[in-house]
Image: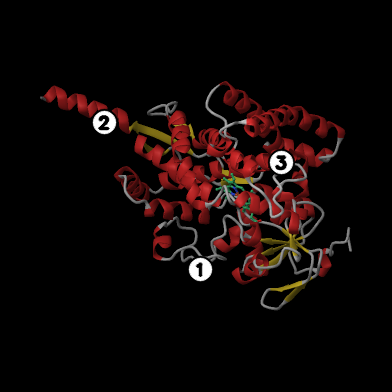
């Protein structure tokens, strides 16, 4: 036993390479690494990729069901996420388990309920239009930073409830600096080398976090005192009004930690998914054309929904989720008994590439989701069970709003061949940032046509 965890010898077989060699492949080529191990070992195998704890990877939907339907006492996710604590804070929903987790989750779920998302439509469309106004016609752009600018603005306005203006600009600068420091892969490597608890790393982190924290506490105080709090529609206002089962409101520390969590869980993930959507679409002109036609038509958008589902299937931005077992379980159709203390990883990426569920799994084919809706344990880009992503409706709603804004304003085209999967800190992104050519502005083309029409008269 090692720190109370089972050793690699107690667990299902896996690659024998040294830990650093596995970690390197996991960072550089996550999909190839996982797929290769499945070819060798089947749907259950053990790797060593993150720290000194072995990780049992699960690629069979039946085993994933076992994890997602397991009790909160039997599977801890918070305890498996402690690396995030210096940034998120100890009250973050991502770091809590059992009753404490359930309390925060209940408080958060209300404001993120699917039907409420409609009220963010205008903010999302405005944030997209503001970014689109800077797109250079006829040139090639990297779509990822453009999407990050949009998703950051949306979180600041819809979640933090900050109106456009000076305050928003100041927070934007502070958040960008903090996000750069905390999600930059070089910083992560440095933190792994020096240890997140080293004096130097802590100093660097405080330098970028302190001004953000000051600002967040100021925003919380300002909202708390606002006479129109009950009429406000942002998520922070709703969290301030929310009460737990004992009638207690959230404390300022809890609110700060959840705002930081929503920012980090919701900003880069949504931007990365959007980048993949455009990367995939521009390499498949017929699909792009069908989607564009639907979005420009202004009616129902079933194809857009299928495009989002297919993007998230083929290019999930988080390849795995992790749970720490507090009780033993059996996986692999009865072949393996995993002891308490094991870290298990339902592999989103492997389930989504199964050819028994998704014929031609490497093909981008949104039609498959029009024929068959996504399954609870077979389409899992947002994880599942009691820890399923709180922001899944928000993210999909935002993706649709941004795709609509982009494709009703511009015609896009691929600027290069398909991009490989690359890692940007936590999420998987297009290797070259999603390079697309902005062929033509639809609005400009329309007004030219109108002038031509007028001249012809
Ligand atoms: C495309 C975008 C997104 C993806 C792919 C994504 C994916 C995920 C995944 C895989 C989990 C872990 C689930 C598990 O352990 O089973 C998660 C959790 C979470 N996500 Fe998202 N997410 C996205 C967007 C968002 C947004 C926009 C927000 C909020 C603004 C958000 C807030 C959260 C929170 C609070 C949790 C923790 C839930 C809990 O522990 O109970 N996410 N997300």
What element does badge 3 sit on? helix
Instruction: Name the spot of residue 261 as percent of width and height, x first.
Output: 67, 43
Which label sits on residue 102? none
* Residue indicated by mark 2: 446
Which label sits on residue 257? 3
Q: Nearer the viewer, mark 2 or mark 3?
A: 3
- Which numbered disc, 3 or 1, marks the residue that appears first in the sequence? 3
Mark 3 vs mark 1, CA separation in Å? 39 Å
Instruction: Classify residue 48 as left or right of residue 228.
Output: right
- Name the residue at 64% across, 54% down: 106
Instruction: Classify residue 442 as left or right of residue 431.
Output: left
The reply to whether dot 3 and dot 1 touch (C-beta < 8 Å) is: no
Please indicate, yes or no, whether residue 331 appears anywhere in the rendered image: yes
- Which numbered disc, 1 or 2, marks the residue that appears first in the sequence? 1
What element does badge 2 sit on? helix
What element does badge 1 sit on? loop
Does the closest atom of ligand 1 sit within 8 Å of the Cβ of label 3?
A: no
- Name the residue at 68% across, 74% down: 332
Please indicate, yes or no, whether residue 413 appears anywhere in the rendered image: no
* Image quadrant in which you'd find residue 372: bottom left
Instruction: Specify few, some or many for label 1: CA neighbours under 10 Å numbering under 14, 14-19, or 20 or more.
Output: some
- In the image, residue 153 above or below residue 377: above
The reply to whether dot 2 and dot 3 touch (C-beta < 8 Å) is: no
Which quarter of the figure is the C terminus placed in?
top left
- In the image, residue 325 above or below residue 399: below
Instruction: Specify few, some or many for label 2: CA neighbours under 10 Å numbering under 14, 14-19, or 20 or more.
Output: few
């Amino acid at each position: 036993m090692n720190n109370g965890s089972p050793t690699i010898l107690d667990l299902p077989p896996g690659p024998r390479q040294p830990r650093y060699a596995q970690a390197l492949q996991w960072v550089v080529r996550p999909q190839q690494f996982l797929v290769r191990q499945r070819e060798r070992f089947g749907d259950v195998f053990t790797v060593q990729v993150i720290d000194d704890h072995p990780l049992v990877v699960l690629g069979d939907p039946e085993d994933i069901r076992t994890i997602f339907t397991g009790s909160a006492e039997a599977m801890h996710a918070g305890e498996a996420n402690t690396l995030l604590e210096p940034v998120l804070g100890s009250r973050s929903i991502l770091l809590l388990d059992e009753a404490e987790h359930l309390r925060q989750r209940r408080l958060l779920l209300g404001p993120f309920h699917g039907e409420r998302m409609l009220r963010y439509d205008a903010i999302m469309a405005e944030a997209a239009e503001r970014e689109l106004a800077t797109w250079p016609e006829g040139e090639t752009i990297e779509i990822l930073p453009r999407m990050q600018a949009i998703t950051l603005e949306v979180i600041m306005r819809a979640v933090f409830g900050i109106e456009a203006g000076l305050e928003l600009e100041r927070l934007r600068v502070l958040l960008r600096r903090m996000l750069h420091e905390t999600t930059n892969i070089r910083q992560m490597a440095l933190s792994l080398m020096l240890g997140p608890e080293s004096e130097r790393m802590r100093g660097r982190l405080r330098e970028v976090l302190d001004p953000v924290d000051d600002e967040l506490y100021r925003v919380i105080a300002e909202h708390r005192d606002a006479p129109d709090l009950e009429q406000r529609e942002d998520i922070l206002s709703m969290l301030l009004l929310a009460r737990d089962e004992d009638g207690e409101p959230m404390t300022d520390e809890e609110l700060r930690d959840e705002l930081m969590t929503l920012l980090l869980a919701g900003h880069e993930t949504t931007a990365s998914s959007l980048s993949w959507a455009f990367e995939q679409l521009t390499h498949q002109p017929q699909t792009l054309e069908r989607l564009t036609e639907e979005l420009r038509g202004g009616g129902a958008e079933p194809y857009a929904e299928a495009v989002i589902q297919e993007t998230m299937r083929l290019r999930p931005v988080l390849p795995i989720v992790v749970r720490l077992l507090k009780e033993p379980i059996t996986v692999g159709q009865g072949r393996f008994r995993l002891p308490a203390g094991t870290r298990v990883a339902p592999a989103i990426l492997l389930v989504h590439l199964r050819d028994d569920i998704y014929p031609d799994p490497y093909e981008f084919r949104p039609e498959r989701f029009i024929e068959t809706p996504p399954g609870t344990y077979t389409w899992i880009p947002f994880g599942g069970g009691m820890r399923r992503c709180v922001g899944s409706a928000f993210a999909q709603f935002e993706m649709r709003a941004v795709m609509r804004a982009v494709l009703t304003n511009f015609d896009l085209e691929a600027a290069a061949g398909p991009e490989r999967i690359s890692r940007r800190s936590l999420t998987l992104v297009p290797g070259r940032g999603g390079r697309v050519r902005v062929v033509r502005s639809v609005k400009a083309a329309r007004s030219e046509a109108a002038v031509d029409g007028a001249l012809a008269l």
